[in-house]
Image (cartoon, rainbow, N blue to C red):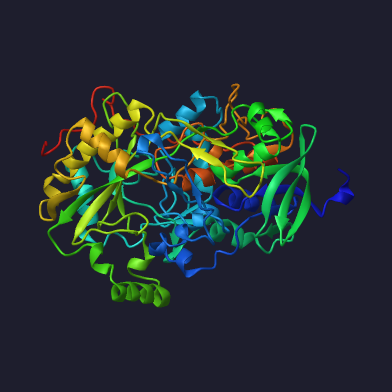
Amino acid sequence: MSEAAYDAEFDYVIVGAGSAGAALAHRLSESGEHSVRVLEFGGSDNSIFIKMPTAFSIPMNMKRYDWGFHSEKEPGLKGRSLHQARGKVLGGSSSINGLVYVRGCAGDFEEWQELGASGWGYQDVLPYFKRGEDCVYGGDAYRGDQGGLTTCNGNNMKNPLYRAFIKAGEQAGYGYTEDYNGYRQEGFGRMDMTVRDGVRCSTAMAYLKPAMNRPNLDIQTHALTTRVIMDGKTAVGVEYRQGGKTLKVRARKEVILSASSFNSPKLLMLSGIGPADHLKEHGIEVVHDLPGVGQNLQDHLEVWVQQECTQKITLNSWLGPLAKAWIGANWLFLKRGLGTSNQFESNGYIRSRAGMKYPDIQFHFLAGAIAYDGSSAFKGHGFQVHLGANKPKSRGWVKLKSADPEAPPEIVFNYFAEEEDKEAFRAGLRWTREIFAQPALDEYRGKEVSPGPDVQTDEQIDQWLAETAETAYHPAGSCRMGTDAMAVVDPECRVHGVRNLRVVDSSIMPTVTNGNLNAPTIMIGEKAADHILGRTPLRSDAPSFAPDDWQNSQRVSAPERSV
């Protein structure tokens, strides 16, 4: 295609202004030497529901800000189809997520290296977590204080239930962690969230807004990317729809897909890059047969373990219209109070069994009993943990439903297809009950609400899981990084067999990390920028924690009260 056929040209074209794409746009444009265009299907993030941390469940359920994806009917969940919220707005999913900041544990990145992602070990990625962060507790060997992404604890655990949960985790033998994003993930401690001065700190705030006035950065909103333009096996540009027109932008250097674990493989396939037989089914000319595109899809499931609270101190007191109005006014005018927090202010990480070096179970503690999306609440006072088994063995896929770029992809996770995934949740529930039974919660603990005391056997737990487990909104792995035949990108995020095309988002993760995905996805954007610009990768020598007796013990000490 001649240059005259393009509507514009830039050095780099980035598809997606989300967690990774925003970080990339900032880093690639900051020297002023390179011109960058960003294509984002969504629009402005200027909404009170996005800005107010406690209101996060609202934008994730709004068509204006959410792609509205759903999985296919999942056999392991009794045929339920799960809503898969993905941000369609500046900042992407960082603008509609639960604001939780979790990097993952050192073992996650050791695993990546073992699976072929050389140069992505813990010491390799730690500097990139630090580079983008402004931690309110200050910088050290593990935390950054010079970046744009502010992290804090929200409302600072003013409700006594948060600290009681931490103490209960210690009493159960798991220990205390000063900083689960630092030296030691395992244990119980405060939760970090992406909040700055009481306002959500998305990647739009942290990365895009400081860069928007750069003359070499151009951000196009309401732009639906339809395909990567290929010249043989070289990416030369991007086609997109905007304002009723079909437009083309030329990439003088590279095209970079940062469109999510659903849309990045979809765009590769629409561009003729993917499993040849599948492309032919949809009448798409095969540019490059790459069988791993769309495979290896993973996600985190979670269940809510709810307990009645004997004291009227929970968030359930604040669910009425007058209470919500007070929270909103306090936040709007003063940027303080409950509105400044996602309400997940303490958490814990444990190993489901002995013989594991690093945690695989995550607890988010909430000083209330209410669904994650705000859709339902316990009638009375209660508290809960969101229990997640975070290292699933089950794998799914993303495929095309049609060659129409506006059609959603086919999304199948195969939740609970592997027995090990059920085993991890069974263990997680039993450990949760033991934690809730510790002395620190004696003055607050009432009866178990969910799953309830009648759910005890493996079969009963499996039934409860199938009926109630929900996605934690952490899709990953569908454009896996590695060097084998099923890998989609190499360790520098370049698409195998194709020139001038990279994928930079959560889809390149070989395995999903032990925790929420916003932080590691931002890190991927930070690190990929150095690869793209040809810079020497950063490296740290900071050590990480592992228990001395991890091969023989499931926790660091015996519980005070066994159940």
Quarter of the image for residue 381 reads bottom left
User: On the rendered structure, is 109 left or right of 315?
Assistant: right
Residue 326 lies in quadrant? bottom left
User: Does residue 193 lie above or below 48 as drawn?
Assistant: above
Determine the residue positioned at 24% across, 40% down.
175
x and y, in percent, of residue 471 in the image: 40, 45
Q: Nearer the viewer, residue 307 or 241?
A: 241
Residue depicted at 11% across the width and 36% down the height: 562
Placement of the C terminus among the 4 image quadrants: top left
- Vertical comparison of 475 with 342: above or below: above
Question: Residue at (66%, 34%) from the top-left corner?
Answer: 494
Residue shown at 22% from the left, 55% from the top:
383
Residue 323 falls left or right of residue 9: left
Q: Is residue 362 visible?
A: no
Please give the count of numbered marks on the rendered protein: 0
- Where, quadrant-wise, is the N terminus in this rendering? top right
Q: Quadrant of residue 507?
A: top right
Residue 82, percent from left and from top:
42, 46
Q: In the drawing, does residue 176 fall left or right of residue 340?
A: left
In x, y percent, where is residue 320?
A: 28, 71
Q: Is residue 22 left or right of residue 297?
A: right
Q: Is residue 25 in view from this perspective? A: yes
